[in-house]
Image (spheres, rainbow, N blue to C red):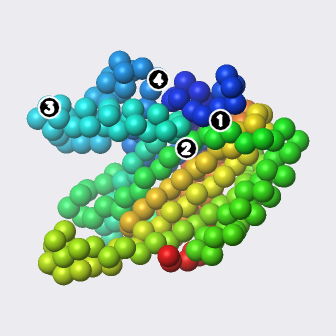
Amino acid sequence: MTTSVDSTSGTLPHHADEEPPPLWFNVPDGFFALPLAATPEERAERSHEFVRGLYSRGDESIWEPAAPYYEGLAELMAGNGISYSAMGLFSTAEEAEGAAEGEDGGGFEARYEGADGVAQCAFTVAAVPTDQSAKDTDVAAQGILAVLSREPHNDARWLDLPCGPAVSCITLTKYQLSPKVTATGEAVDLLTGQIQVHVPFPTGPFTAIFTLYTASTDYWTEFCDIMAAVLRTVSFTEPSEDEEEAPTDPSSPSADPVSSGSAG
């Protein structure tokens, strides 16, 4: 799936009347894009399409009440500068993992069965204004790295992506769930992980922020591979038809943006 993120996807913060230049990237199967759109009519139409894809085995009794919820969520996200948002759902069944590893080298099967176990993630892309020229993406990335490295719980690292310099920031956070909300009636620790990658635009004074968040940390390595695969496809120029059709393969070599993290 090839995705183009531009100013028509949502209301982004910008310098005066300047809007972010376009950005392209690929996401693997298993991602369900939320219905972000510029107008209420478009969001309503996309939300109905979204719930039919997300609950593919459902019917109108499920789709109709669910669509307005995701429509409202999309409006909230667009109003906060998010240009692209998706839910990632992947089967964790052993037979699905074996099939995926044998065929593609990954650890997930995109066609999920809830009864067999599902690993979930939230994925967003936003563009925020930063003061850099086309020649100063290195300087912008160095500044981002310096700021993120000040926080002791951040695992901030420099990345050299095909599209240019970037900075990854990994955060692991542990929460304690109240006995009132757990199946066992006992307090349970929940570990969550966030991968956030900042990529300065070489085409304008903006930085793209890719964020993947998950509570399925038993599959942290697989989510790291997915994020690495997406980042390898980021482009600030429109890709050719061959590049658009190329699959996102998490198993191909890359600088993995996540290999460790710190719990806070």
Asked whether, in this view, residue 161 is left or right of residue 260, the answer is right
| Badge 4 element | loop
Pointer 2 local density, CA inside 10 Å: few below 14, some 14–19, many at least 20: some
Disc on the earlier residue, 2 or 1: 1
Residue at 77% over, 34% down: 203
Name the residue beneath numbered marker 2. 125
Disc on the earlier residue, 3 or 2: 3
The CA span between labels 4 and 2 is 16 Å
What's the residue type where badge 3 is placed? Glu
Pointer 1 local density, CA inside 10 Å: few below 14, some 14–19, many at least 20: some
The CA span between labels 4 and 1 is 17 Å
In this view, the residue farthest toward the right is: 135
Asked whether, in this view, residue 150 is left or right of residue 98, the answer is right
Name the residue beneath numbered marker 4. 38
What's the residue type where badge 4 is placed? Ala
Quadrant of the rendered image containing residue 145: bottom right
Residue at 68% over, 39% down: 129
Name the residue beneath numbered marker 3. 60
Name the residue beneath numbered marker 1. 23
What's the residue type where badge 2 is placed? Val
Task: Give the percent coordinates (x, y) of residue 72.
Answer: 32, 34
Q: Is residue 18 above or below residue 227?
A: above
| Badge 3 element | helix
Q: Is residue 189 above or below residue 38?
A: below
Residues at marks 2 and 1 touching, judged by CB atoms closer than 8 Å: yes
Residue at 50% over, 72% down: 172
| Badge nearest the viewer, 3 or 2 | 2
What's the residue type where badge 1 is placed? Leu
The CA span between labels 3 and 4 is 26 Å
Quadrant of the rendered image containing residue 143: bottom right
